[in-house]
Amino acid sequence: MKPKILAIIPARGGSKGVPRKNIRDLAGKPLIAWTIEEAKKSKYINRLILTSEDDEIIEVARKYGCEVPFKRPIELAQDDTAGIEPVLHAIKQCPGYDYVVLLQPTSPLRTVEDIDGCIETLLASGSHFCVSVTEPNQSPYWMYTLENDKMIPLMPQEKLVTRRQELAKCYALNGAVYVGKVSAILSEQSFLTEETTAFIMPKDKSFDIDTELDMVVCEQLLKTKRNIL
């Protein structure tokens, strides 16, 4: 039997790094619209909803065809609200689904191929969770903490590797796609466990907008992609 899949877009109004970023114009449409439009193309997602406490964001999401079945309680839209809390709340408001796909609107370069690819990876693996990752620009093997202005390797090595080709491959969360089995999410209250499977995405689709510079870079990449197509 084909599993029932609920996709959730979390978008609160209180962004600090880029004010009102979820509805800021990005290459001709609100940031959140890029995620809504790609999610609606999925061949696996049965229902796409927004969770937000912000009336303006809700209005924009509905304009682009995203369902908003409830308004998020303000206490779940604070700076210190854990990211899983709005997901748990949405699951309770919309019961009856086997899997949840979390799609943050700050990943405008993520496409339906990435969304469906992550879902397919999870279903094929038999795991309860799958999240998207990418290779970081800088390897953690070349990162340091500071103690009294002295450099302390973040990941101590017997011998310092000086050639990138010799470094162990590392991956970082890119924030684009999180998929989990509903029962496991309710139990673990996280998408990240020792059993979580990775779905690897390329760097050029892995930008997570957190600063004004991120907005500029993504705008240029989206316009370039549009010209190529």
Image (cartoon, rainbow, N blue to C red):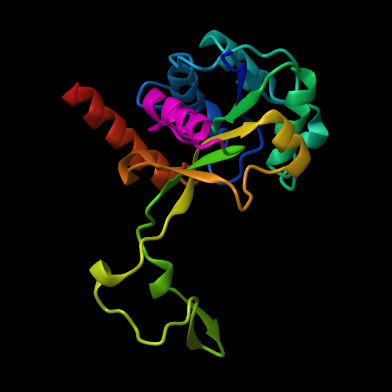
Left or right? Give the position of 115 relative to 78.
Answer: left
Left or right? Give the position of 22 relative to 224.
Answer: right
**Residue 128: horizontal and vertical position, in percent?**
62, 37
**Residue 75: horizontal and vertical position, in percent?**
82, 36
**Residue 197: horizontal and vertical position, in percent?**
52, 44
Residue 199 vs 98, above or below: the answer is: below
Residue 153 vs 21, above or below: the answer is: below
Q: How many numbered callouts? A: 0
Identify the image quadrant of residue 127: top right
Q: Is any part of residue 25 visible from this angle?
A: no
User: In percent of the image, x 50 and y 36: which residue is there?
Assistant: 106
Left or right? Give the position of 114 relative to 131.
Answer: left
Instruction: Say whether residue 184 is magenta.
Output: no
Q: Residue 164 or 10: which is nearer the viewer?
A: 164
Identify the image quadrant of residue 148: bottom right
Instruction: Say whether residue 118 is magenta.
Output: yes
Quick one: which residue is furthest to the left in this view?
228
**Residue 10: horizontal and vertical position, in percent?**
63, 30
Give the extent of the magenta segment.
Answer: 105-126
User: In percent of the image, x 75 and y 32: which residue is there?
Assistant: 88
Q: Residue 102 or 220: which is nearer the viewer?
A: 102
Quadrant holding the N terminus? top right
Residue 109 vs 49, above or below: the answer is: below
Q: Is any part of residue 104 visible from this angle?
A: yes
User: In percent of the image, x 68 and y 41: which residue is there?
Assistant: 83
Q: Main secondary structure of the magenta part?
A: helix
Identify the image quadrant of residue 220: top left
Quadrant holding the C terminus? top left
